[in-house]
Image (cartoon, helix red, strand yellow):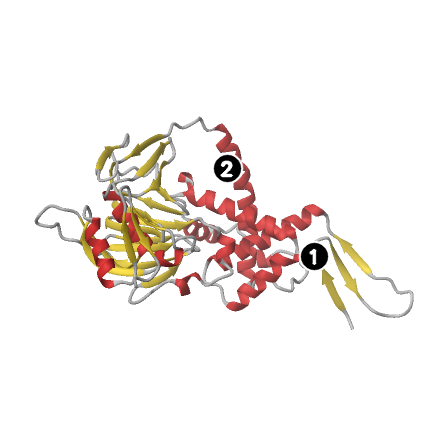
Amino acid sequence: MYARAWNDEQDVDLAPGKAGERMNIYRTSPQQSRERAAREAAEWLQVMGGTPTDADRSGFAAWVARSPLHLEELLMAQLVERELAASAALQAFDLDAVLAQARAQDNVVALHDAPVVAPAPPVSAAPVARGRRRRVGWVLAAGVAACAVLLGSWKLLQPEVPVYQYASAVGEQRSIALADGSMVTLAPASYIAVRFSAGVRDIELRDGEATFDVAHDSSRPFRVHAGDNIVQAVGTRFTVNRLPSGTLVAVSEGKVKVTATGNWLESLWRDDAATLEAGKAKVESLGRPAALSAGEQARIPQGQQAMLRMPLEVSSEPVDGKRRLSFRNDTLADIISEFNRYNPRPIVVTDPLVREQRYSGVFYADDADSFLQFLECCSQLRVSRQADRNVIDGRSRQ
């Protein structure tokens, strides 16, 4: 009988035999252990960022639990991946073209032909992958580590970038011309912060809704940060709306790339897509950036790594010129958030269960009372009209 055990500190040959026979121990240095953990973290990031199977999830959980070093390297790999994805210098980088060019060179030696110095110890819960994929993962891990150093040094050398803040009042719609020629239209009670540098155009939608007409600039990506989500555009027109339930993205012209940057590790322990109400829409993972084209919109639930892709509903301009709000099975929290942008007397609901109730209908944006009358008529909720606010009570009316 022969068995081989391995952990993060040493390789051990367990060979039971005659009395006095010694166990062979092959020690690995802390640096070798960290390098191995970094390679495995890079590969797990690829596996779990796609469409992991139940076996993948189980193996990943066992791998993370085996050593604190694994979790540390996983977090580092995730951080570097996000920085690389957001880097303007890498936007035009074509990995497939580089690999094709390398394969065409006569002086390139295939990795599987290289002599094996020492076989890697087996890992009890490593991701299932082909040999070539594992070797590519090692190469990517080494590149990621190098890029982490370069990105850190680059950031330290960057000059301080000024931040410009713009806001609209309740009931006010405001148009803003940005320095690059882009236009932003703020919905009522909305708030943005603008930070332009030589390499990127960043806008943070801190509250409310905004429509962006983006001026084309291939050297500087245009990114809108909305909570845990990033929407990146290239010469396009799109709208981003922050609501209690999550983020809505609607594309009128061109294309955008949607990325979720929330708690990636937490999302791996649950099935985000299962919590979405798909209907006829398409549920997609945001483990990797997703593209939205003109005529599409997406709902990204708060804190989740999935989105619900839907056709864009084009609302016709009302004859009377008044803004209308259209709701289709939306939560009361989202509906109230929309009405409170247009009406000086806010609607308040304190019961979290009531806030999750869903309603449909079309109402004038500046006539919140019509919605309150609807609730009084067609629900079991009570409405208390006070001098400075309207309070929705979850207790049933007698």
Q: Nearer the viewer, residue 185 or 2?
A: 185
Q: Say few, some or many: other residues with alpha carbon within 10 Å of mark 1 (under 14 / 14 to 19 / 20 or more).
A: few
| Gap between marks 1 and 2 measured at Cα | 33 Å
Left or right, residue 260 beside residue 75: left
**Residue 151 numbered mark, or none:** 2
> Of the residues shown, which amino acid type is indicated by label 1?
Ala
Left or right, residue 152 beside residue 249: right
Residue at image x 22%, y 36%?
174
Give the mark toward the camera: 1 or 2: 2
**Residue 164 numbered mark, or none:** none
Q: Position of residue 323 (x, y in %)?
A: 17, 47
Look at the numbered disc 1 and give the secondary structure of its residue.
loop
Residue 132 quadrant: bottom right
Give the residue number, with chain letter if any, for mark 1. 118
Q: Nearer the viewer, residue 365 or 128?
A: 365
Q: How many marks?
A: 2
Q: Position of residue 78 (x, y in %)?
A: 51, 48
Q: Position of residue 241 (x, y in %)?
A: 30, 47
Residue at image x 40%, y 28%?
161
